[in-house]
Image: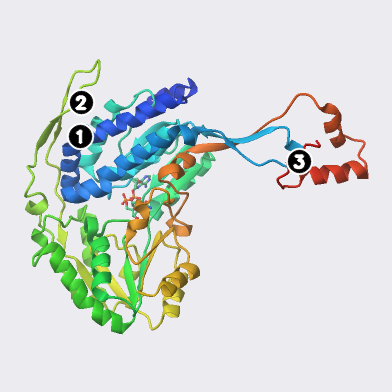
Amino acid sequence: MDPFADTLQRLREAFDSGCTRPAEFRAAQLKGLSRFLQENKQLLQEALAQDLHKSAFESEVSEISISQNEINSALRNLRAWMKDEKVPRNLATQLDSAFIRKEPFGLVLVIAPWNYPLNLSLEPLVGALAAGNCVVLKPSEVSKSTEKVLAEVLPRYLDQSCFAVVLGGPQETGQLLEHKFDYIFFTGSPRVGKIVMAAAAKHLTPVTLELGGKNPCYVDDNCDPQTVANRVAFFRYFNSGQTCVAPDYILCSPETQARLLPALQSAITRFYGEDPQSSPDLGRIISEKNFQRLRGLLSCGHVAIGGQTDESDRYIARPEHPLRCEQSSPSLPGRTAQRVMLLPSRLGPGTSAPTVLVGVQETEPVMQEEIFGPILPIMNVRSLDEAVEFIRHREKPLALYAFSNSSQVVKRVLAQTSSGGFCGNDGFMHMTVASLPFGGVGASGMGSYHGKFSFDTFSHHRACLLRRPGLEKVYALRYPPHTPRNLRVLLAAMETRSCSCALL
Ligand code: NAD
């Protein structure tokens, strides 16, 4: 028995009816998403706190507001994005109309991870709905509380003939992927990305893969160590290091390392206090499995800062929040108001203090796998050239950071490397700029989204040319019997250059 067949058939029929195409329908869905965020803010914050011990600040900044901004931008620009895009023509098509039409793909699957379980579900969803698709959202089963809100509350704000949330872990998602979708948008690990791409290939379904990896952070000798330490520590330990674009490791000289270590210690103490474990602003590791994996990484190199772990740290997850919260659901026309209840989920299994490792070897696990936790190794290099060489010899990362008082140094790192995104002298601020595409390259992924890039990602760019029925005498130049003169005229007419005269 296929648990997804009925849902998928319902969504396909809705798409085929054409109901998702008008701008008004798309705008109504986006407004529904906006109301979902506004009316369930507290419920969402509770869920995020239960899943990851996210502080209200982190939830607001990195989950709720960022999703709201994406919705607002789509609502503001929807009609402009939907417009046919006129393109320049060659001489042979001067009298015609040539344009790109942005068409919805059809039935789209969005698969989300657990680390920003709300934002990484909603941001792709905004693009998919704005582009006029029907959408199946598969949130992460690991971030259980947020998954529950997305499954039980979100559908009430959207047209359920066109949108569905389906639940499941690897096995169920594998079953879901056997179905034919018209587009798959996956955010997660490179390992599962390969599984998704292989499943998509069976149906020739196009994919966007938003993956992870190790993001290098080069720190030049010419820098202010405290400024660098503040910025690197903030972005490394945000969400307890469980961020795909977090600086994964530092590359710097031994001299800069010596200046950075006290500055990093100072930043960590200012941010999280003398006892980071009791800080309300430090998140928790999502699962027992990841906690054990991270604890294993602490044996690489030497611990210079932090290094403490507490596997049994369950009470600390949300001391300032009640474990049970209730919230009225929105009252929608024709629906009976229901109550959504978040029961205490299994709390994060442990804490790991913000940690800095030194003396690590590139062959050690901490330099071989994506860390995805509050651990920051420092690798020593003797020069900028050696740092660039180190970066170039590895998979292309999702993000790359360079810190220097010299703009020449930052520009050299930018020019001599490749990565999904780049930020000079800060952490992952580049991904907050909606006019920049967000996505990986090589092993860190393919495709991009955010703002208009999301709309374009979820739209088929249909090449259209509308010709006139007449002028057959002119067009007859193309037909046999061919002559050298006709060939010359045709080749000239098909050359790509802007020309306002109309010979053909
Ligand atoms: P994951 O790959 O384990 O899971 C992602 C999704 O895939 C989940 O919904 C999960 O249910 C599903 N899944 C897991 N195993 C599957 C299988 N065998 N078959 C089909 N589906 C399966 O990733 P995660 O642990 O949730 O997230 C962490 C990873 O995601 C990190 O590598 C991180 O860098 C990456 N990530 C990337 C971005 C980005 O924007 N590029 C953002 C967040 C996280």
Which of pointers 1 and 3 indicates the residue nearer the eye? 3
Expressed as whole percent of the image width and height from the top left, the position of residue 336 reads: 19, 18
Q: At 24% from the left edge and 30% from the top edge, which residue is drawn?
A: 153
Colouring scheme applied when the structure was drawn? rainbow
Question: Could you tell me how far apart the alpha carbons at marks 2 and 1 are, in whole angstroms?
Answer: 8 Å
Question: Where is mark 3, residue-wise?
Answer: 91
The crowd level at tag 3 (other Cα within 10 Å; few <14, some 14-19, many 20+) is: many
Q: At 12% from the left edge and 37% from the top edge, which residue is drawn?
A: 343
213 and 479: which is toward the camera? 479
Tag 1 secondary structure: loop
432 and 355: which is toward the camera? 432
Expressed as whole percent of the image width and height from the top left, the position of residue 116 reads: 28, 48
286 and 487: which is toward the camera? 487
Question: Where is mark 2, residue-wise?
Answer: 330
Question: Could you tell me how far apart the alpha carbons at marks 1 and 3 are, in whole angstroms?
Answer: 56 Å
Tag 3 secondary structure: helix
Q: At 33% from the left edge and 58% from the top edge, which residue is drawn?
A: 428
Answer left or right for 474 relative to 460: right
| Whether the residue under disc 1 has CB within 8 Å of ligand 1 | no
Answer left or right for 85 relative to 41: right
Expressed as whole percent of the image width and height from the top left, the position of residue 210 reads: 41, 50
Query: Label 1 sits on what residue type?
Result: Asn
